[in-house]
Amino acid sequence: MQSIVVVGTQWGDEGKGKIVDLLSEKADIIIRFGGGNNAGHTLVVDGKKLILHLIPSGVIHPGKTLVLGHHMVLDPLALNDEIHTLQAIGLLQDAKKYLRISNLAHIIMPYHIDLDKLREAQKTGKIGTTGRGIGPAYEFKAARCGIRMGHLRYPELFRGLAEKALAKANPEIERLGGERHSVSSVVGLLCLASHNLAPYIDNIHPIIQDTKALNLKILFEAAQGAELDMDQGTYPFVTSSTTLASAAASGSGLGPMDIQKVIGVVKTYTTRVGGGPFPTELLYEVGKHIRTVGAEYGSTTGRDRRCGWLDLVQLRHAVGANGIKELFWTKLDVLRGLHPLRICVSYRFRGETITSWNDIPAELLHEAEPNYISLDGFDEDISGARDISDLSLKALAIPRYVCEKLGVTISGISVGPDREQTIMVNKFPWGYPGISTFTF
């Protein structure tokens, strides 16, 4: 078996969909292993934008097995809509053959969504959730009153599952000013979900083990980014699951030693959606410029993304926590015309210099002042570059500096939104065509 995990190294929105799309050409099976429809991967194919929230980005390549793994939480209505949307544009035509949903994944129910929105409305220090019910679904999973996708095959269980879940959900919903959910409405939704999705639900463990035995290529697609991880991110301003590469194994039925390569995806600057600390955030003209040129608006919510300079303290943590040896750089073209370019290399915090992530609680990280180094910017249009030799040393300044400091290599560099606007640098996994070689 040959396995690669693609993970985000910041707060999500790094452009993971693009490299997953490229790697999917050679992969046999693509697995999304965590999160829910709070994530969104944007692909540009032949000038057309495609936003995916649940289905792996490899869907644009026919004949690939697509798997939604154990750690996911799935809104059955949103998932069914996404399947039909893809089929309407000629994709996922053989869904019953190629789409597999883990029977161990949990279901997002309407009461989860109500709880999510009602709680967020009550908070003074908002986390900025998407309101999709993700957090409550994971909460119910931990409280042993969740409903799994596998339950959809057994209608005789529906009423008991609904009663157990609503005994937890309804009292809080009413206390927060919402309306109770009836057992009959929950049972009705489960019946609808069973009708729509049962053909895709499977025990994926044998599928993954067979793939391993046949020495096929497995590509794991992470959602969001390292600093939204429940444990190692900027807690409590995080998502409700693990976003790190280690979850690829437990979220699919493999062991940790089965993960062979981890590729981290990083923007040449940093963005964040929603609340939470952001030490290098640019609140004025430069930040607005990056947001406008980079089209930094959430693919799931449409919200403006907060923009800032690259943070080496944060990125060093992400590389170590994920076991990353290669970085795939995105949106280098967005920095054209900015002088100078800056990278945060440490923080000043209460009289000390801080170089390690998580030394400062997230609730106090707003006090940290970034220490920057400056690099020369570039003015040339790099959107047409297709080989590393087409890029000047100034254009390569940020990737070169960071990779040298972190002891990692460059997988590739994206110079525009289209999938063809990609330069592959190191020898690319699985013999991707059009490789150029480059060493520093």
Image (cartoon, rainbow, N blue to C red):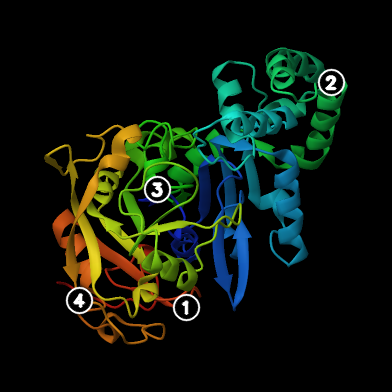
Disc 1/disc 3 C-alpha distance (Å): 28 Å
2 vs 1, front mark? 2
Residue marked by disc 4? 376
Up-down: is 185 above or below 413?
above
Which mark, residue 182?
A: 2
Earlier in the chain: of badge 1 and badge 3, it is: 3
Crowding near pointer 2: few (<14 within 10 Å), some, many (20+)?
Answer: few
Q: Which residue is mark 1?
A: 420
Q: Nearer the viewer, mark 4 or mark 1?
A: 4
Which residue is drawn at the image coordinates 68% and 24% (left, top)? 147
Q: Quadrant of the C terminus?
A: bottom left
Identify which amino acid the numbered label 3 is placed on. Answer: Met
Q: Amino acid at mark 2?
A: Ser
Q: CA distance from mark 4 to mark 3?
A: 44 Å
Mark closest to the chain's N terminus, 2 or 1: 2
Alpha carbon distance from label 2 to label 1: 51 Å
Q: Amino acid at mark 4?
A: Asp
Q: Secondary structure at mark 2?
A: loop
Q: Nearer the viewer, mark 2 or mark 3?
A: 2
Q: Is residue 284 visible?
A: yes
Circle 4: is it few (<14), some (14-19), or many (20+) Cα within 10 Å? some
Closer to viewer: mark 1 or mark 3? 1
Pointers 2 and 3 in contact (CB under 8 A)? no
Please tell me how many numbered marks the rendered image carries: 4
State how far apart marks 2 and 3 are (Cα): 47 Å
Q: Picture coordinates of residue 255 (x, y %)?
A: 38, 33
| In contact (CB < 8 Å): disc 4 and disc 1 | no
Residue pointed to by mark 3: 1
